Amino acid sequence: MLSRVAENLYWTGRYVERAENTARLVLATSQLHMEAGGKARLPWAELLRIMGLDQHAPLAALGNEDGPAIRYLTEDEDNPSALITSLRQARENARSVREMLPSEAWESLNGLYLMAKEHLREGRSDADRNQTLRDIILQRMVLAGILHETMSHDVAFLFVRLGEMLERIDMTSRIIDLTTATRQADEDGESLGNSAGWMNVLRALGAYQMYRRHVGVQVVPQSVIAFLFGDNHFPRAMRYCLNLLEESLGQLPLPAQTRGPLRALAPHLRTDDIHDPESLHQRIDQLQVDLGKLHQRIYDQYFASRQRPIVAEAEQPQA
């Protein structure tokens, strides 16, 4: 496999995961708005900062209205991280490596992009838009199932999964950070937020039922944070994703080259010293910086020389 092929597979995984999580983030924010009776204006500038878009977004033009900000996050093709842009980029990367993917996976991804392009357009009601976002999440999970069940778990699959897991840690941390933008603080201003806000985060990540099963029926902020940061079994918990990252990199050639940046992520998943929104936000900021370093190491190690062949140990010829 050439480095350029590996890079296209990696970015296919990242962009598809980014699209799904953008849909989850917008749905979570919309739900917060509805729970406030539609009266409260959400801090869209802060949300765009959480998404890393504050340097790109035309904040003055967006104002404080919900509609323009949501359209910017979902359907504005001038936004490099809009949902529709992520799906288009995933489709283009996958098109260039179609021979590496099951045909059903390409058809599923192509259909997902065309569906989103048709239905994410200005003028649709909030209810229609939210249903489209739910459909995108569901169809993306179908695509994940197709890849997992019909693609050989070889080097090509490992690079797709690398992209997915790195992006999932990043986006999960941003959805958690949503609470720092929308929390209703206690009088002392030190609260981690109310249970309704954290329940919304759990639902946005599809984690509410598993949290109730493994942690408890009461939504306690510190317990939610511990579950989403450190659970070893829930697929959207950051510890679970980090374990898969480590497993995938361990099966690629020269895994020691990525070991340092990978190990730097683990301390950020401790939650015993997170007691207020500021400490939570700082932990997430540090995590995202180190995720960027790991991405750069992966790029330097596997993608920088786009014509260099990549051979995993399992694929090397036997003596």
Image (cartoon, rainbow, N blue to C red):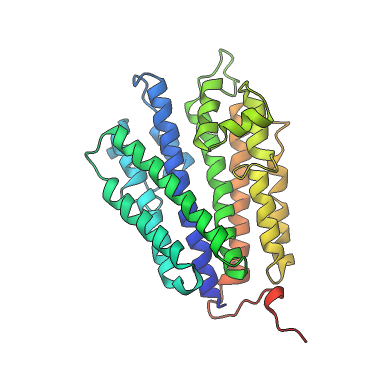
Q: Which residue is drawn at 51% across and 25% down?
A: 197
Q: Residue at x 72, y 63 (%)?
A: 250
| Residue furthest to the top | 187
Closer to the camera in the image, 141 or 19: 141
Where residue 315 sits, quadrant-wise, is: bottom right
Name the quadrant of the C terminus. bottom right
Lateral position of residue 237 relative to residue 94, left or right? right
Q: How many labels does the image show?
A: 0
Q: Is residue 238 visible?
A: yes
| Residue furthest to the bottom | 319
Q: In this view, does 244 lie above or below 40?
A: below
Name the quadrant of the N terminus. bottom right
Where residue 232 sits, quadrant-wise, is: top right
Q: Position of residue 55 (x, y in %)?
A: 41, 47
Q: Position of residue 255 (x, y in %)?
A: 72, 66
Q: Residue at x 45, y 38 (%)?
A: 25
Q: Where is residue 191 in the image (x, y as percent from the top left)?
A: 59, 20
Q: Is residue 27 above or below residue 193?
A: below
Closer to the camera in the image, 3 or 210: 210
Q: Where is residue 213 in the image (x, y as percent from the top left)?
A: 65, 30
Q: Is residue 82 visible?
A: no
Q: In this view, does 204 lie above or below 22?
A: above
Q: Which residue is drawn at 66% across and 34% down?
A: 227
